[in-house]
């Protein structure tokens, strides 16, 4: 195995471990709604608070990686993720106490995910950086799915505090893996990179980069709204049909759906390389919007046919993920790559903050115990990829 591939695999493992707490709260929503006496909007805010914190911090921490070794930023992020998980396990008792630790988690994840991509890119010397970058972004789906599965299994056997505890311990393991398997790399600091650290205007003037950034924002709106409410959706669908399905079984079903995102993301990137990135994305993103509407309209289906449709939707919505990120990296000059990724994260996580709250508002207004509420909540997610496709078509030129 080449050195580049070993490095990529090490960063993928670190990412999976660092994201151990990413889906813990979302998995526990059906359990903690009555325990903490939360409304659906408050549950959406707890999810969205992490994304908002991510949005505010990501441009700064990613832009800093144009001037310092991105690995140092990732190490700090892993420490923060551990602290957030341990804080939720021991100190959270309701909305406000949980909100604090969810904000810490958002800040820590901002220092982990895209700085990790930058750290990986800075260490690649071989002929296949695009595929290895796509592998790293696809590992995000693996980390997300395993976070959900672990929380579902642990909560059923040991309770919700133990689920949060596990989410705090695993990022510490990731820190050890990162230290043991990667070397220090200091980036070449130029006058351009110094400017880019503090000035996002060159990114906003770059029409192709802006197109990919807005497309990514639409993708994140859909993706994080879906992930926030997936387990609760399956819980509602199973209860409505009278199916006695355990929390761990529902988590396993949701995990399987999310795991489809890993091959789907890689396949989407390969499709983009064959058809052209713009053309492929303009096929994939409207397809995801149509499936969001389809799942919303099919919410009253029997449980297992609905699960199959949800799984298809989960795969299609992830097919554009790596294609968008690799496309952005490909059109960005190296001197401001960290800054550009930071602006992308600001746009994406701002959209991700809004989506869970909008879906929660649909549930509160139309009823979280009624098909109409869930139909509106899921269908609303399709606005993200639809608007993202419009931005790509307008700003990214044909090749």
Image (cartoon, rainbow, N blue to C red):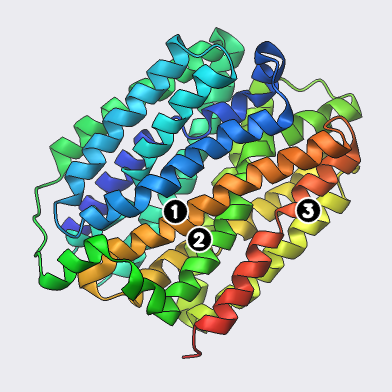
Q: How far apart are marks 1 and 3 (CA)?
A: 25 Å
Out of 50 and 86, give the one closest to the viewer: 50
Which mark sits nearer the N-terminus, 2 or 1?
1
- Mark 2 lies on a secondary structure that is helix
| Residue 193 quadrant | bottom left
| Residue 31: mark in rendering | none
- Residue at image location 39% in from the left, 79% down from the top: 205
The residue to which callout 3 is attached is: 379
Task: Locate residue 8 relative to residue 247 in the image: left or right.
Answer: left
| Residue 254 quadrant | top right
List x then y, in percent, for residue 135. Answer: 38, 57
Which quadrant does the N terminus fall into?
bottom left
The residue to which callout 1 is attached is: 138
Which mark sits nearer the N-terminus, 3 or 2?
2
- Residue at image location 65% in from the left, 42% down from the top: 356
List x then y, in percent, for residue 116. Answer: 29, 49
Out of 168 and 130, give the one closest to the viewer: 168
Instruction: Say whether residue 260 is visible.
Output: no
The residue to which callout 2 is attached is: 321
**Contact flag, marks 2 and 1 (Cβ < 8 Å):** yes
């Amino acid at each position: 195995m080449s050195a580049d591939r070993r490095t990529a695999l090490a960063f993928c493992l670190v990412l999976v471990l660092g994201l151990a707490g990413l889906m813990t709260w979302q998995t526990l929503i059906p359990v903690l709604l009555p325990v903490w006496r939360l409304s659906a909007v408050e549950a959406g805010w707890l999810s969205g608070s992490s994304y908002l914190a991510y949005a505010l911090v990501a441009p700064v921490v990613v832009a800093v990686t144009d001037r310092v070794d991105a690995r140092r930023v990732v190490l700090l992020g892993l420490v923060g993720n551990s602290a957030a998980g341990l804080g939720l396990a021991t100190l959270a008792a309701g909305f406000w106490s949980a909100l604090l630790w969810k904000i810490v988690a958002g800040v820590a994840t901002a220092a982990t995910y895209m700085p990790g991509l930058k750290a990986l890119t800075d260490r690649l010397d071989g002929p296949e950086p695009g595929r290895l970058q796509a592998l790293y972004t696809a590992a995000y789906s693996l980390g997300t799915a395993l976070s959900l599965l672990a929380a579902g299994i642990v909560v059923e056997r040991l309770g919700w505090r133990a689920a949060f505890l596990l989410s705090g311990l695993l990022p510490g393991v990731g820190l050890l893996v990162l230290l043991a398997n990667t070397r220090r790399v200091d980036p070449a600091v130029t006058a351009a990179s110094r400017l880019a650290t503090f000035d996002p205007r060159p990114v906003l003037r770059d029409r192709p980069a802006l197109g990919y950034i807005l497309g990514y924002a639409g993708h994140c709106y859909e993706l994080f709204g879906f992930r926030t409410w997936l387990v609760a959706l399956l819980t509602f669908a199973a209860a409505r049909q009278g199916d006695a399905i355990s929390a761990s079984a529902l988590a396993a079903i949701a995990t399987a759906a999310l795991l489809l995102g890993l091959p789907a993301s890689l396949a989407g990137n390969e499709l983009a390389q064959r058809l052209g990135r713009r053309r492929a994305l303009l096929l994939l993103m409207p397809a995801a919007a149509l499936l969001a509407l389809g799942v919303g309209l099919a919410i009253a289906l029997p449980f297992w046919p609905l699960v199959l449709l949800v799984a298809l939707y989960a795969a299609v919505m992830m097919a554009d993920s790596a294609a968008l990120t690799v496309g952005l990296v490909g059109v960005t000059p190296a001197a401001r790559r960290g800054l550009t990724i930071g602006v992308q994260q600001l746009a994406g996580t701002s959209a991700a903050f809004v989506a869970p709250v909008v879906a929660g508002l649909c549930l509160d207004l139309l009823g979280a115990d009624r098909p109409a509420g869930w139909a509106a909540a899921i269908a609303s997610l399709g606005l993200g990829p639809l608007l993202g496709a419009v931005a790509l078509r307008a700003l990214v030129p044909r090749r």
